[in-house]
């Protein structure tokens, strides 16, 4: 009897020891830090900001200084961030990756990979309006507002938002959306799979996306190019040449063709809205859809309900509309 009881106690002790070994280690809290830095400048600023992982926000402030506010974060799992995460964060706090040479400022360019392993830094920057900006993040959002530019902002994964830019703007996102508003210059925008929206652009526009929609609004003049693999493309207020292509989405364009318009879609509908007294050469073709026009047109050659070559008014720039299976509409406004 005594032997049996001893065996039971031994078995219980062994089970408890096994559970203790198998039990997960206590979770480590995330390690965080920050640094703040103010730089004095005395003229237009040329700024280059980069972070491997983290958000970048740039807005305008006093003309004589640049304020940099950084938030540092280590991965929640210290086994991947490294058990020395806190010491590395402390080092970054004490040695901020900020360099200044006159009015040229470089932020976040740290070449020590071991130091930055699984650590992200987000930047909030206040800079004079007269700033030329290049910013890039591997994973994070970007927001830039009010700078004179030019501006070039890139993210591998995240959204890019640029507003009230005083000159040309370029925005690229690997998988996020791109939004631009009130740009006083030319716009170049690209996204691997997100949507692109641009409103209040005074110059030309060039936009491309793998599968998202594209909506562009122009307030000035300039040529427009846009392409999407499968999304819808909508363009408003164009006063120049237009070249638009999409694999399967619809295309809608409104404006004045002072240059040639070429709008092609694989299987979507095509709609163009033009001023009532516009003159142009019309080429329209659909494989299985229909063609409708509110303009009085003069046909040339044989009449084909799915393919038209016509002179509208006194002729002029070419308006070339093609779709495989969609409907084509030419509307006056």
Image: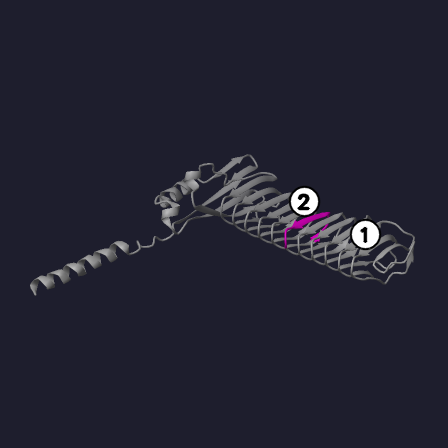
Q: Residue at x 88, y 50 (%)?
A: 316
Instruction: Pinpoint residue 19: horizontal percent, then vertical percent.
Output: 25, 58
Q: How many marks?
A: 2
Q: Quadrant of the C terminus?
A: bottom right
Q: Quadrant of the N terminus?
A: bottom left
Disc number for residue 320: 1
- Callout 1 environment at 10 Å: few (<14), some (14 to 19), or many (20+)? some
Residue 85 occupies quadrant: top left
Disc number for residue 34: none
Instruction: Pinpoint residue 188: horizontal percent, then vertical percent.
Output: 67, 46
Q: Quick one: 331 or 136, which is closer to the camera?
A: 331
Local secondary structure at mark 1: strand
Q: How is the image coloured?
A: one colour
Instruction: Pinpoint residue 92: horizontal percent, then vertical percent.
Output: 42, 41
Instruction: Pinpoint residue 256: horizontal percent, then vertical percent.
Output: 81, 54
Position of residue 189 in the picture relative to residue 67 (left or right): right
Q: Residue at x 44, y 38 (%)?
A: 113
Q: Which residues are magenta?
A: 200-211
Position of residue 197 in the picture relative to residue 98 (left or right): right
Please tell me whether mark 1 or mark 2 is closer to you in this view: 1
Outermost residue toward the bottom in this view: 1
Residue matched to label 2: 168
Residue 134 occupies quadrant: top right
Outermost residue toward the left in this view: 2
Q: Earlier in the sequence, mark 1 or mark 2?
A: 2
């Amino acid at each position: 009897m005594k032997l049996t009881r001893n065996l039971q106690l031994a078995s219980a002790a062994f089970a408890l020891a096994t559970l203790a070994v198998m039990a997960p280690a206590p979770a480590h809290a995330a390690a965080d830090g920050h640094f703040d830095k103010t730089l004095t400048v005395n003229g237009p600023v040329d700024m280059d900001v980069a972070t491997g992982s983290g958000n970048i926000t740039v807005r305008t402030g006093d003309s004589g200084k640049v304020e940099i506010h950084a938030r540092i974060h280590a991965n929640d799992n210290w086994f991947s961030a490294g058990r020395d995460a806190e010491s590395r964060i402390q080092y970054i706090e004490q040695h901020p990756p900020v360099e200044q040479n006159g009015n040229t400022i470089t932020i976040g360019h740290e070449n020590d990979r071991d130091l930055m392993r699984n650590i992200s830094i987000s930047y909030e920057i206040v800079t004079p309006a007269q700033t030329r900006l290049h910013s890039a993040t591997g994973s994070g959002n970007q927001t830039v507002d009010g700078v004179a530019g030019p501006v070039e902002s890139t993210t591998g994964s995240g959204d890019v938002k640029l507003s009230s830019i005083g000159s040309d703007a370029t925005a690229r996102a690997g998988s996020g959306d791109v939004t631009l508003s009130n740009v006083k210059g030319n716009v170049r925008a690209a996204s691997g799979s997100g949507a692109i929206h641009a409103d209040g652009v005074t110059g030309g526009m060039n936009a491309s996306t793998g599968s998202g929609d594209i909506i562009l609004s122009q307030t000035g003049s300039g040529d427009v190019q846009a392409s999407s693999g499968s999304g819808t493309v909508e363009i408003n207020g164009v006063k120049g040449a237009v070249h638009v292509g999409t694999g399967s989405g619809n295309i809608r364009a409104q404006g004045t063709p002072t240059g040639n318009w070429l709008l092609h879609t694989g299987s979507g509908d095509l709609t163009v809205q033009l001023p009532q007294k516009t003159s142009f050469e019309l080429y329209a073709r659909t494989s299985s859809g229909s063609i409708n026009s509110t303009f009085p047109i003069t046909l040339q050659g044989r009449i084909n309900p799915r393919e038209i070559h016509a002179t509208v008014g006194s002729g002029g720039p070419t308006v070339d509309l093609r779709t495989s299976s969609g409907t084509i509409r030419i509307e006056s406004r």
